[in-house]
Amino acid sequence: MKKLFLLFCISSILVSFTSFNFSEESIIGTWEIKSPKNTAEGEGFITFDKEGYILMEYGEEKMDGRSFEVMGGKATMSYTVDSKNQPIEIDFKTSIEAYGMTFTTKGIINFINKDKAQFAMGKMNESRPTEFTKENSTTLIRKK
């Protein structure tokens, strides 16, 4: 009986160290994108800020979601997170002011722990992925 109790205690401690409760703020920060699709330019980075904007970096290219140029006009890129569903839903919204155009890219995210997540995005203005596959997903590692 003592061995069973000890096993239960050890299991409870291990589970408490590995459990992770998601909150909207869990995504805030800079994440390294680990993908088999990345090119020789190196890994990319994505930063989710507190105001809901995205900063993306691939090699030497940087795109600040608060303001960047695309198609000859000013654009913004923001994100929203909906944690009511599992996996968690995340949407990227790109707005090009000069043309009055807005595009939404729908995705899902599954936090493995506070520093690692599975991430899958659909194509612009298409449906949200429903699962993580080799073709649609990447791993995000929180940059320290």
Image (spheres, rainbow, N blue to C red):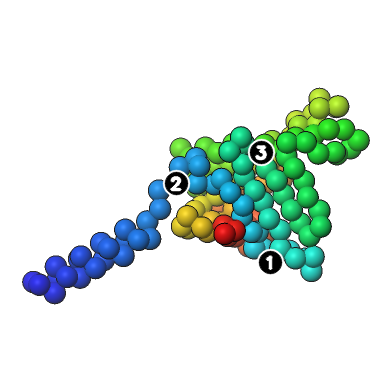
For the residue carrying disc 3, how many other residues have a C-alpha within 10 Å: few (<14), some (14-19), or many (20+)? Answer: many
In whole angstroms, how far apart are the C-alphas of marks 3 and 2? 19 Å
Which residue sits at x=62%, y=44%? 48
- Of residue 101 and residue 41, the one placed in the foreground of this image is 41
Q: Nearer the viewer, mark 1 or mark 2?
A: 2
For the residue carrying disc 1, how many other residues have a C-alpha within 10 Å: few (<14), some (14-19), or many (20+)? Answer: few
Q: Are the two marked residues, 1 and 2, in contact with CB atoms closer than 8 angstroms?
A: no
Where residue 38 sits, quadrant-wise, is bottom right
Q: For mark 1, what is the residue?
A: 36
Residue 102 position in % (x across, y down) = 75, 30
Q: For mark 2, what is the residue?
A: 22
- SS for tag 2? loop
Ranked by sequence position, the earlier of labels 1 and 3 is 1
Which residue sits at x=73%, y=39%? 65
Horizontal side of 75 relative to 83 (left or right) equals right
Query: Residue at the top extreme?
Result: 100
Q: For mark 3, what is the residue?
A: 53
Horizontal side of 11 relative to 128 (left or right) equals left
Ranked by sequence position, the earlier of labels 1 and 2 is 2
Where residue 77 sits, quadrant-wise, is top right
Q: Amino acid at mark 3?
A: Tyr
